[in-house]
């Protein structure tokens, strides 16, 4: 009897160990269908009918470090039904539900919520948009490049800010609890650095030709340039982690709610500016928000400043050339009068005057 | 304060004497030829007092903070040029560099306040003692313009000798005024950039002090041209940068060249370290101050008397200094 | 002479401070000169002079291609990792005309075929053995690295990571399997690189040749090359031409390669029976 009981307990231990071994350490769960068998090779690809080089490689090492590492291929690529699959013509829909259930959630995960908010924003495709505008507007994956977790110092992670972002997609209940228990989120980040954000937005907004075809107003056309001339832009260009990048001002914590200035929901709308600026400028006030952020000193817009700037430049050149002429004249005359360049001696009137 | 008589001799600092007088007679010394500086011996570390210890310390404050401010500021402003990131990483990144810029600025302001105390307190003390002479200060005079014109005439070969100048000649006064102006602009514009929230309010509240009718005119007619506070912020951005560039270029090409590079000053003028000026330099560019030194410093008087005796200038005689034997 | 001053020479220390001063002046001077000439803020007056001195040739085709390569990152979604590239002169001569993705004819497998370019050079698959010399000249395969006469490996794709099951990441990503002619124990390379005399000469005169002349030269280039490559089972079978073990492949990797690792696929989907596609 005793022996049987002992044997029984032992079997349970063994079973538990086996269960842990089998389910606890499965790493390749995302590629159940072995898509990587072909797609793991770097040079799998071709030149397409338009002469464009298309690569189909999915780097297995990188993918397993990305946020989507637990999502199996066909959760997104839903139109692939057989192997070998036909040429893929349909785009992936990020609003699909995948087979991942977030902690504390009843339903499978989907990006639908944020996509709905994105579609409302200036970047969302509207039915009344001109065809070239529809084509130019970025889809999800234009910006979201399956980000890789990069390790950062724990102190560098702003909990409140990150948590606010979590709630863009995850339900409110349990998000904090889950977040604080998931250590990889405490020490890793996937968000872009300010520099990368500027680079990303500039890809379209600095493309003057593209912007012109979309009938963008003058201020929009020069937005990147004026930003780079501002102290925000300069600090970010030099690697600042705290200075404002594009989305610091143009979006709220939801990040996707970018609107034109005259839209009531825009963070850069006159009525909302105080809240937006307050994120960094704590003492913001009614008059402070009148200061131009994307400032441009244009001859027609700000003639007074334009000519002041011109005058200052003129004064600079006049001063420098005036003083340098005086210096050269003086040196020439003193040398002529017998002054010598001497390295060692303190007394230097060694030459004979030629005057 | 002085001791001189005779027709062609001068009272120290008296500008009424003829500009072209070759000899200056000083009681108890002799006839000092204008170009005696060609014959004196000098210690490069300085023979005669020029700056007090306070001025030396203030200059230290100014030039060390200036280098830091220029390096961080220029790198931040010209962020798109290749050298900027290197300089910024030397200062430990953009955010640190901005902090360093502010600390250096505060230190420079401190140096400025220190200077203000000395230049107000020093003269007050001297007035009390009855020793104050405004000609020995940086206060601009009409005479400085004459000196500038005469000096240029000398450079062009139209005059035989440089004008007799005071402790601070036109170059130094020009530079000093430029620093005063530049510091005022840089500090006010810089604070405007550092505390935009406060300045935005100050500018608009300043308008509030105006009578209501004026405010109306202001807001209606001028606002388009002069919108507050956006205008002032843009103006501050413009002025801060422009004034800084001007300062850097003037300091590097004019000031540093003038004091350390030109013949006679090369390879280094020690004045900013020792507070003393060489005899040769003092006589050449600050002749009137030298005459004052003669009366104030007995050793110097003795030196010059012996030198003149040796050269035969103890009594008034018309001899060209060119004919005299020079030191080796 | 009256008493001399204590010293008439500068202390040695002067050179240190003086040097600092001069360096500061030079630094500002260099900055100003750079600013007005080469920097983006240069004076507009010198723009034409600059354009003359630094002439950049603009090619619409090249710009389009570059633009596409950049936008491909945004289309691709999955991270594209940087892969080391051979310098121009070290690349096999084939790439001049056939590009990095040479296969395009057989739609269903072109991507799979292009995938093989990571492992071996063109001639490995497309080699044509001379009928006359076949008897005493054998073709052997070994790893070839243009920068290294005797590459030691480990080479990419030769073994699995025991823990993750992924291919082991390696340093040497440039080595490829290449054919050599073996005659009387001597090895001679069967491939031509871009800085081979013949290739260099061809690149020089390419634009001046008539179409007929060009065809003639092309024949010369392709003397050891057959247009249709080996079929799969030439390598992917138990008695293939590769000695996987000798080439450094691990045991389980060798097994996978020999069975083509697609055994299940082939049995499930009849139309993916690869050898048929080549007939």
Image (tube, coloured by chain):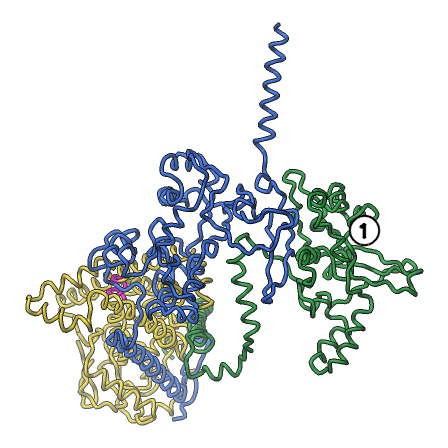
Chain colours: A blue, B yellow, C green
**Main SS class of the magenta portion in the image:** helix
Where on the picture, by quarter, is residue B46?
Answer: bottom left
- Quadrant of residue C145 within the rendered picture: bottom right
Please identify the residue farthest to the top as the structure is shown: A1
- Residue C254: image x %, image y %? 76, 44
Most foreground residue, C18 or C42: C42
Q: Label 1 is found on which chain of the structure?
A: C
Indicate yes or no whether the magenta region holds residue C148.
no
Q: Position of residue C247 (x, y in %)?
A: 78, 50
Badge 1: residue crowd in 10 Å (few <14, some 14–19, many ≥20)? some
Residue underneath mark 1: C242
If the image is split into quadrants, where does the C terminus of chain A sit? bottom left
Q: Is residue C174 visible?
A: no
x, y (%) of residue A354?
41, 92
Residue under the point 39% across and 48% down: A114
Q: Name the image quarter holding residue B236.
A: bottom left
Secondary structure, mark 1, is loop
| Quadrant of image for the N terminus of chain A | top right
B181 relative to B328, above or below: above
C129 and A119: which is toward the camera: A119
Q: Which residues are magenta?
A: B186-192
Up/down of B121 relative to C26, above or below: above
B188 falls in the magenta region: yes
């Amino acid at each position: 009897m005793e022996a049987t009981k002992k044997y029984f307990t032992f079997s349970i231990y063994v079973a538990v160990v086996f269960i842990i071994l089998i389910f606890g350490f499965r790493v390749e769960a995302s590629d159940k269908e072995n898509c990587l068998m072909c797609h793991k090779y770097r040079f799998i690809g071709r030149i397409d009918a338009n002469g464009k080089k298309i690569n189909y490689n999915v780097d297995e090492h990188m993918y397993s470090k990305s946020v989507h590492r637990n999502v199996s291929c066909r959760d997104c690529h839903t139109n692939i039904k057989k192997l070998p699959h036909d040429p893929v013509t349909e785009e992936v829909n990020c609003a699909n539900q995948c087979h991942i259930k977030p902690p504390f959630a009843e339903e499978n995960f989907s990006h639908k919520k944020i996509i709905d908010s994105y579609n409302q924003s200036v970047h969302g495709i509207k039915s009344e948009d001109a065809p070239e505008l529809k084509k130019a507007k970025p889809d999800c994956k234009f910006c979201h490049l399956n980000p890789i977790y990069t390790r950062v110092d724990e102190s560098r992670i702003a909990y409140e800010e990150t948590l606010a972002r979590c709630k863009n997609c995850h339900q409110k209940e349990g998000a904090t609890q889950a977040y604080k228990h998931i250590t990889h989120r405490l020490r890793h980040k996937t968000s872009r650095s300010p520099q990368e954000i500027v680079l990303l937005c500039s890809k379209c907004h600095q493309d003057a030709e593209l912007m012109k075809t979309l009938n963008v107003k003058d201020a929009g056309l020069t937005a990147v340039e004026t930003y780079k001339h501002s102290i925000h832009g300069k600090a970010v260009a030099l690697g600042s982690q705290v200075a404002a990048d594009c989305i610091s001002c143009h979006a709220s914590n939801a990040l996707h709610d970018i609107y034109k200035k005259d839209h009531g929901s825009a963070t850069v709308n006159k009525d909302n500016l105080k809240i937006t600026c307050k994120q960094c400028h704590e003492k913001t006030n009614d008059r402070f928000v009148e200061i131009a952020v994307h400032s441009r000193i244009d001859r027609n817009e700000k003639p007074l400043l334009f000519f002041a700037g011109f005058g200052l430049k003129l004064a600079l050149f006049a001063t420098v050339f005036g003083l340098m002429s005086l210096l050269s004249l003086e040196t020439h005359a003193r040398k002529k009068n017998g002054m010598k360049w001497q390295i060692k001696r303190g007394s230097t009137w060694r030459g004979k005057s030629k005057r | 304060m002085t001791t001189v008589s005779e027709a062609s001799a001068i009272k120290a600092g008296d500008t009424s004497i003829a500009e072209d007088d070759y000899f200056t007679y000083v009681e108890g010394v002799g006839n000092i030829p204008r170009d005696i500086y060609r014959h004196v011996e000098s210690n490069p570390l300085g023979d005669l007092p020029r700056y007090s210890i306070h001025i030396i310390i203030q200059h230290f404050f100014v030039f060390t903070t200036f280098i830091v401010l220029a390096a961080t500021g220029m790198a931040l402003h010209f962020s798109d040029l290749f050298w900027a990131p290197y300089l910024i990483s030397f200062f430990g990144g953009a955010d640190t560099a901005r902090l360093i810029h502010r600390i250096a600025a505060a230190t420079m302001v401190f140096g400025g306040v220190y200077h203000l105390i000395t230049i107000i307190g020093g003269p007050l003390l001297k007035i009390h003692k009855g020793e104050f002479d405004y000609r020995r200060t940086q206060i601009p005079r009409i005479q400085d313009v004459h000196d500038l014109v005469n000096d240029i005439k000398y450079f062009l070969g139209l005059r035989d000798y440089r004008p007799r100048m005071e402790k601070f000649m036109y170059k130094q006064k020009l530079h000093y005024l430029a620093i005063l102006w530049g510091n005022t602009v840089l500090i006010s514009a810089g604070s405007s950039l550092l505390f935009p929230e406060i300045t935005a309010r100050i500018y608009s509240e300043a308008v509030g002090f105006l009578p209501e009718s004026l405010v109306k005119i202001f807001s209606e007619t001028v606002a388009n041209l002069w919108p507050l506070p956006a205008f002032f912020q843009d103006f501050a951005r413009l002025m801060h940068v422009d004034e800084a560039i001007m300062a850097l270029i003037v300091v590097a090409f004019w000031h540093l060249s003038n004091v350390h590079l030109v013949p006679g000053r090369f390879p280094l003028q020690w004045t900013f370290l020792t507070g003393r000026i060489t005899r040769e330099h003092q006589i050449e560019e600050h002749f009137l101050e030298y005459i004052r030194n003669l009366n104030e410093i007995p050793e110097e008087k003795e030196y010059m008397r012996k030198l003149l005796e040796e050269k035969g200038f103890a009594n008034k005689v018309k001899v060209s200094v060119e004919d005299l034997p020079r030191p080796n | 002479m009256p008493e001399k001053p204590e010293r008439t020479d500068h202390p040695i220390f002067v050179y240190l401070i003086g040097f600092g001063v001069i360096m500061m002046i030079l630094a500002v001077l260099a900055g100003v000169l750079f600013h007005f000439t080469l920097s983006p803020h240069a004076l507009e007056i010198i723009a034409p002079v600059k354009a003359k001195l630094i002439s950049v040739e603009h090619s619409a085709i090249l710009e389009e291609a570059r633009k596409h390569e950049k936008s491909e990152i945004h289309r691709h979604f999955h991270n594209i990792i940087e892969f080391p590239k051979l310098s121009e002169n070290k690349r096999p001569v084939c790439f001049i005309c056939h590009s990095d993705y040479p296969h395009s004819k057989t739609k269903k497998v072109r991507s799979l075929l292009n995938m093989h370019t990571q492992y071996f050079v063109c001639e490995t698959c497309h080699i044509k053995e001379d009928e006359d010399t076949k008897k005493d000249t054998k073709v052997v395969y070994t790893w070839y690295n243009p920068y290294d006469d005797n590459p030691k490996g480990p080479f990419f794709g030769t073994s699995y990571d025991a823990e993750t099951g992924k291919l082991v990441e390696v340093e040497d990503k440039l080595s490829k399997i290449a054919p050599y002619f073996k005659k009387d124990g001597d090895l001679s390379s069967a491939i031509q690189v871009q800085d081979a005399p013949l290739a260099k000469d061809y690149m020089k005169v390419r634009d001046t040749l008539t179409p007929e002349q060009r065809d003639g030269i092309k024949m010369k280039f392709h003397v050891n090359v057959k247009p249709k490559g080996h079929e799969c089972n030439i390598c992917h079978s138990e008695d293939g031409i590769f000695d996987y073990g000798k080439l450094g492949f691990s045991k389980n990797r060798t097994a996978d390669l020999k069975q083509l690792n697609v055994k299940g696929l082939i049995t499930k989907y009849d139309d993916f029976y690869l050898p048929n596609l080549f007939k």
